[in-house]
Image: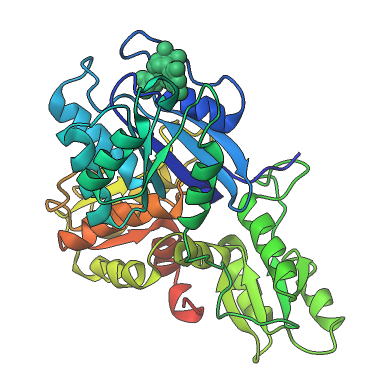
Amino acid sequence: MQTTPTSERVHIALFGRTNAGKSALANRLVGQDVAIVSATAGTTTDPVQKAVEINGLGAALIIDTPGLDDITSLGKERMARTARMLDKTDIAIVLFTDAGTDTELKLLEECRVREIPSIVVLTQSDRIADSEALAKHINLLTNKEVIRLSATTGEGIEALREAIVRCRPSDERLITEGFCKAGDIVMLVMPQDASAPKGRLIQPQVQTIRELLDRGCIPICTTPDSMAEALAGLKEAPALIITDSQAFEAVYRLKPEESTLTSFSILFARYKGDIKLFTEGVKALGRLTPTSRILIAEACSHTPQNEDIGRVKLPRILRKKFGESLNIDIVGGNDYPEDLTQYDLVIHCGACMFNRKHVLSRVERARDQGVAITNYGVILAALTGILDRVRVD
Ligand SMILES: Nc1nc2c(ncn2[C@@H]2O[C@H](COP(=O)(O)OP(=O)(O)O)[C@@H](O)[C@H]2O)c(=O)[nH]1
Ligand SMILES: [Mg+2]
């Protein structure tokens, strides 16, 4: 069964002090016991996330977080952890069980600054004597609507769902936005060689085909080997051809004059990140010297089995081009440095595991520090001479 990938889900994070009832609420929203609900302080040390479908919103991810006041970690570390959570948060739910402290107010302020929609809830209302008066008080403190709810009785859960739906991100993005319109024939060139997974298509291909169908376009799927034949069978040239970067040269040779050409990597760099900044950032290649410092940032923390783009391929190409003494730091998972100013270029992976919000948080950090940033797809396209021959935006 195919499910919506995590990266495509609206990330909803629950914030609050220890024992506020985050895990209980997460369970209530998910409808099953996922997080451990416990009266012992600090039981949730790892963020727990669970995929859900929310009526009116669609595919979401509920993220249960450790307490804002969690005494099992140092204050500074705790703040950094919360900041990292916010990096990927599309909607924040902030829990109060009493009048709250500076911690909740600071978090709400941080959400406001970062333009993350936030929802204030008064939890455990079933055991608060005058929850209406308390809600009013919190409303005055936060200047926000306060939803009274109970994970035990279910009171207020429907109101919370409605509030979540109102916060739904408005910038519904399309992968192929501006590249084609309804009725257009779009040819997808997708090599299915030994490196392709057995019995299925990879996620970017699936997502693109689905979107083209939704948009009323006519996707024609082919491999580099059958592309010429596929073209010959068409009455008119495709409006757009999207190719896997591996097959670029062959596709470029076969491409009809009138067809626009782009690649899956470029479309996804644009969909997931900031294509203007990435194509600008890649110009840093022209300024690199043998002593330059480069950061390669991977979203995955695992070590891939096969030859890997970020850890093997890119460093090899770059060292060959700019010298063996090139300084290359590679980080994975959450290890994305606060301070990027020592780098001449940051190269981020395609971030198939991250939501757009998360990628943009990282992109903005580089931009704000004046550091050039690009991604795997764009830099490989530049290094192999593809970038100048495709449409990027
Ligand atoms: N009566 C009542 N108890 C709750 C409610 N939500 C949580 N609790 C209890 O409060 C304690 C802390 O809840 P938990 O979800 O683990 O808090 P967390 O630390 O914020 O994750 C547990 O004993 C829960 O059973 C609620 O809505 N009503
Ligand atoms: Mg918990």
The residue lying toward the viewer, choosing from 384 and 114, is: 114
Foreground residue, 101 or 145? 145
Residue 57 in the figure: left or right of residue 363:
right
Figure disc tally: 0
User: Could you tell whether 171 is left or right of 59 in the image?
Assistant: left
Please identify the quadrant where the N terminus is shown: top right
How is this picture coloured?
rainbow
Figure quadrant, ligand 1 = top left
Q: Position of residue 212 (x, y in %)?
A: 70, 69
Residue 58 placement, left or right of 138: right
- Quadrant in which residue 302 is drawn: top left
Instruction: Say if 179 sits above or below 219 in the image.
Output: below
Instruction: Name the residue furthest right.
Output: 233
Query: Residue at the location (23% across, 41% down)?
Result: 107
Q: Point out residue 31 in the picture as x, y percentages from the top left corner.
A: 61, 28
Residue 74 is situated, as x and y percent measured from the top left of the image, at: 15, 21
Q: Is residue 54 above or below residue 30?
A: below
Residue visible at 22% across and 57% down?
366
Q: Residue at x 40, y 42 (%)?
A: 299
Q: Nearer the viewer, residue 133 or 161?
A: 133
| Residue 376 can be seen in this image | yes
Residue at 17%, 53% in the rendered image: 343
Q: Quadrant of residue 180?
A: bottom right
Q: Position of residue 352 (x, y in %)?
A: 50, 48
Asked if residue 371 shows in the view, the reply is no
